[in-house]
Image (tube, rainbow, N blue to C red):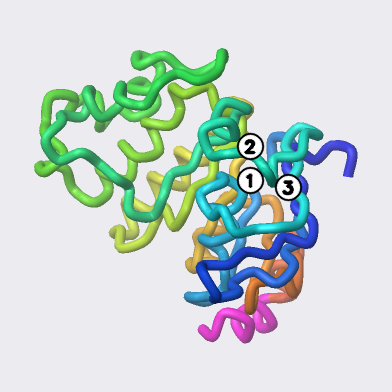
Amino acid sequence: MTDALLEVRGLEAWYGESHILHGMDFDVRRGEVVTLLGRNGAGKTTTMKSVMGVVRQRRGAIRFNGAETIGLSSNRIARMGIAWCPEERGIFASLNVRENLELPPVVRKGGMTTAQVLDLFPRLAERATSQGTKLSGGEQQMLAIARILRTGAELLLLDEPTEGLAPVIVRQIGAIIRDLQAKGFTILLVEQNFRFAATVATRHYVVEHGRVIDCLAREDLEAGGEKLKSYLGV
């Protein structure tokens, strides 16, 4: 696909002797929001870690902006314009919101300024001097996403951004993702909540046993709803 920002072909990955990915194939076009859907243990997070270079035992092809990254370290991949927001969020409890926000380095031109980020996340602006330990789960998730926007990344990898959050916060996260897409970011999203994914994503790849077994466009979700539920076991 000539308009693909990220191309993954035949991606395999291991943790020690455990073979997790068995030939992942998918694309993310520039400006898209794409989800990897699947049950726990399907290989979704490992795929993100492999794209980011965190999983070192991997083979296949991962091309970003046409450049092969499979042999590169995570810091070099980050400098090309990819940022990862892990499920664990990684908020530093001893630092306040502003300090957490400004901790990651700007590795590439084009990142948002702190003021622009706080305009996008008004709740964080209100809590700018609050320590990480005093933030709610939703505020921590907003901060985790906000923190990578200053780096200059073009492709954002978001791992389970709605996990454990109240419905009202989930809707806020959805609005933020749509706003980021409107600003020109490309987003690869790992989700189990396909109802949420349906509100933000253009296309959905279904992952099972470390490979993509189906791809559904947004307009196909209603017709393929029962099939998707069977895939996800819901």
Q: Nearer the viewer, residue 204 or 53?
A: 53
Q: Is residue 232 visible?
A: yes
Tell which tag, 3 or 1, sits nearer the viewer. Answer: 3
Q: Secondary structure at mark 1?
A: strand
Image quarter of residue 133: top left
Q: Residue furthest front?
A: 17
Say which label, 2 or 1, has the lower sequence index.
1
- Amino acid type at mark 3: Ile
Question: Residue 92: percent from the left, percent from the top?
Answer: 20, 38
The reply to whether the magenta stretch includes residue 142 is no
Q: Are marks 2 and 1 in contact (CB under 8 Å)?
A: yes
Residue pointed to by mark 1: 33
Q: Are marks 3 and 1 in contact (CB under 8 Å)?
A: no
- Amino acid type at mark 1: Val
Question: Residue 27: percent from the left, percent from the top?
Answer: 76, 50
Say which label, 3 or 1, has the lower sequence index.
1
Say which label, 3 or 2, has the lower sequence index.
3
Give neighbour class at mark 3: few <14, some 14-19, many 20+ (Cα, 10 Å).
many
Question: Residue 218: percent from the left, percent from the top?
Answer: 70, 58
Tell which tag, 3 or 2, sits nearer the viewer. Answer: 3
- Amino acid type at mark 2: Thr
Location of residue 211 with respect to 201 vertically, above or below: below
Image quarter of residue 172: top left
Which residue is located at x 75 percent, y 37 percent? 5
Name the side, left or right, on which 220 lies relative to 34: right
- Label at residue 62: 3
- Label at residue 186: 2
Q: Is residue 181 visible?
A: no
Name the side, left or right, on which 90 lies relative to 2: left
Q: Which residues are magenta?
A: 225-234
Q: Nearer the viewer, residue 75 or 149?
A: 75
